[in-house]
Image (cartoon, rainbow, N blue to C red):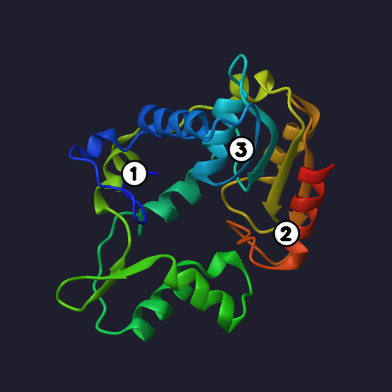
Amino acid sequence: MPGRGQSEWLADPADYAFPTYLTVLTALIAASAAETVSFVGTSMGGLLGMTLAAQPHTPIARLVINDVGPVLERAALARIGTYLGSDPAFASYEAIEAHVRAICAPFGPLTDAQWAHLTRTSVRRDAQGQWRYNYDPGIAVPFRSDAAVPPLWPLWDAITCPTLVLRGAQSDLLSAATARQMQLRGPRAAVLEVPGVGHAPALLDATQLAPVVEFLRR
């Protein structure tokens, strides 16, 4: 998505919003020339997948949503807002990895190699040699200015493709009650809880990946 990783940063931070992201996603799928796609999305990515899957003539044939749903718990949004868009600088790679481990602790127990991978793919070194997160801090501007997100059940109820929902058993963003409703309405998703994990399962080990792979190959 724009503003993250190697993607370009947007001139106006207000454009870091769902209309922009959905336009990018639609263009990306069109450029692939694929008639149908399987979609795996975590958190914001899951919301994007859910929105696209709800559209008429959607190209999404199978949908995996990782620890997000039609109702977003306010406490989790407040927690995410405490660090999203911050731009701390660290003198060493070891220092920024320690920070990644702290803010991503809800991901659950990861190996040292998994933490190293998560850090390497999330940070950059600036022109002064300092380590920073590899995103535009402006991505937080719309997040912090938006009012509470209304329930998105109309989108969920419009989805018809086979759907799998992963939920961290200790998630503060996707409640157990919401996950249960996701089983009962709309695409009547299969729900898999990942023990010992909050928001969100990192999908870095076989026990989490195997059910996703099996679902997509089914």
Q: Is residue 103 above or below residue 163?
A: below
How far is disc 1 from disc 3 in space, using C-alphas? 23 Å
Kindly indicate the quadrant of the structure image that contains residue 35. Answer: top right
Looking at the rendered structure, the secondary structure element under dot 3 is loop
Name the foreground residue: 47 vs 8. Answer: 8
Which one is earlier in the sequence, the residue at label 2 or at label 1? 1
Kindly indicate the quadrant of the structure image that contains residue 201. Answer: bottom right
Question: Hey, what amino acid is under mark 1?
Answer: Pro
How many C-alpha atoms fall within 10 Å of the one at disc 2: few (<14), some, or many (≥20)?
few
How many marks the image carries: the answer is 3
Q: Is residue 91 above or below residue 88?
A: below
Q: Residue at x 61, y 21 (%)?
A: 58
Looking at the rendered structure, the secondary structure element under dot 1 is loop
How many C-alpha atoms fall within 10 Å of the one at disc 1: few (<14), some, or many (≥20)?
some
- Of tags 1 and 3, the one toward the viewer is 1
Q: Quadrant of the C terminus?
A: top right
Question: Hey, what amino acid is under mark 3?
Answer: Gly
